[in-house]
Amino acid sequence: MLNHLIPTPAREPAQAPAPAPAPAAGTRPRLAALDGLRLIAALMVVFHHYVGFGGNAEASKNAWTKPVDVVFPTASWLASYTWTGVEFFFIISGFVICMSSWGRSLGDFFTSRVVRLYPAYWFAVLATTAVVTLWPLVVQPLGMKDVLLNLTMLQEPFRVGSVDAVYWTLWVELRFYLLFALVVWKGVTYRRVVLFCVLWTVASVLVTAGRAPFLDYIVMPEYSPYFIAGVAMYLMHRFRPTLLLWGIIVISWLFSVRQVSLYSDGLAVSLGRTMDSEPAIALMTLGYLVMIVLALGGLSWVRGKWLTVAGATTYPLYLLHEHIGWTGIRLLRHHLPPWGLVAVMTVGMLLAAWLVHRFVERPLSTVLKRGLTRALDPLRRPLARGEAR
């Protein structure tokens, strides 16, 4: 969900089934704006958890020990809706996965996803478990068996709780990768990606209408519009916009309006307060519009090395901020004013995220990539005569 961006490969040859591709220009520069947008999405989620949520509607289980609308009478209203940063993440993920998988084999796609997701995640599972075990003030730690299963990132299908609540999005991302792997397996082309978007959209409608639990689990109609829109936006970026691509994005947005409204209603019940869905729809729509501007080249002027650093820290920040942050707020709430504490915890989480990226994610990713590449090599080469299949 929160992927490193890879320089976009050269455009497909002219004979590829695509609508009037622009002239080839070699390898495109890195889309620095995407790194900045990922950081904005992550900070939206952090703002929601620290200022708009706080852990639980029940004061004794809340990081602030009182309702957030009491601690932040004005800001908590806006923060109640910035959970839409997750939807923004999903759109970005669709864009990035389509971009980074172009010209890659299925083995390369698998390796890149494992290397990107797991090193920081493993550290976050262990670090969060350690913090909530030492200070079980807001969140209770899981048992050791459940923590070990969390290390696989597959706890949700086994109906086991997550070490940190934000991990639910990773299972959504994994299912998206599994679906898109079908395209990678056949070879990523304009025609196949468009067909993927159309078929996934149709399947989402049919599954929603048919109420089939198993197919619903695979097709994910509540999240599919965001990924589909992101994929279509990348095709617009790579091959220029067409009426078909605009149609895919508009239909995805219309479905997203419905999904955001449903989630907003459910969240209002969870938070025990009255919430309108319009602000959430507006923020979600803003995410669509910003990504469309990026896809059409409107953010190509955005530059800066700091954006690369920001993009690299986004994933660890997302993994670490919630339960560890709530625990920190509970411990320090009497020593700092509320806004000062939010600032300290946010900056502290950003620093921790950079340290995880620099000293955990980068070195471990290198070792993991080397090992996976070596393990997959026998599957890539032709079998020698007489060699067992």
Image (spheres, rainbow, N blue to C red):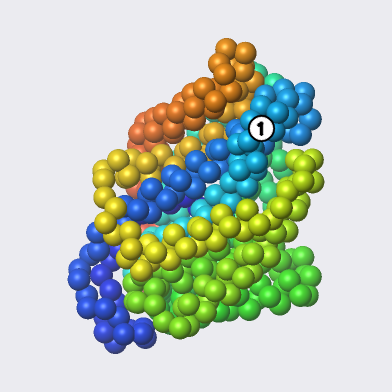
- The number of discs equals 1
The residue shown at (62%, 70%) is 254
Closer to the camera in the image, 270 or 17? 270
Residue 378 visible in the displayed image: no
The residue shown at (69%, 55%) is 277
Query: In which image quadrant can residue 25 be found?
Result: bottom left
Query: In which image quadrant can residue 339 be found?
Result: top right
For label 1, the residue is: 73
Give, as a three-letter code, the residue at label 1.
Pro
| Furthest-left residue in this view | 25
Asked if residue 194 lies left or right of residue 329, the reply is left
Closer to the camera in the image, 65 or 161? 65
Asked if residue 210 lies left or right of residue 312, the reply is right
Residue 377 point in image, percent of width and height: 36, 59
Closer to the camera in the image, 291 or 228? 291
Residue 253 point in image, percent of width and height: 58, 68
Closer to the camera in the image, 389 or 304? 304
Residue 332 point in image, percent of width and height: 59, 16
Residue 73 point in image, percent of width and height: 66, 32
- Against 242, residue 66 (above or below) is above
Local SS, label 1:
loop
The residue shown at (51%, 68%) is 229
Query: In which image quadrant can residue 105 be found?
Result: bottom left
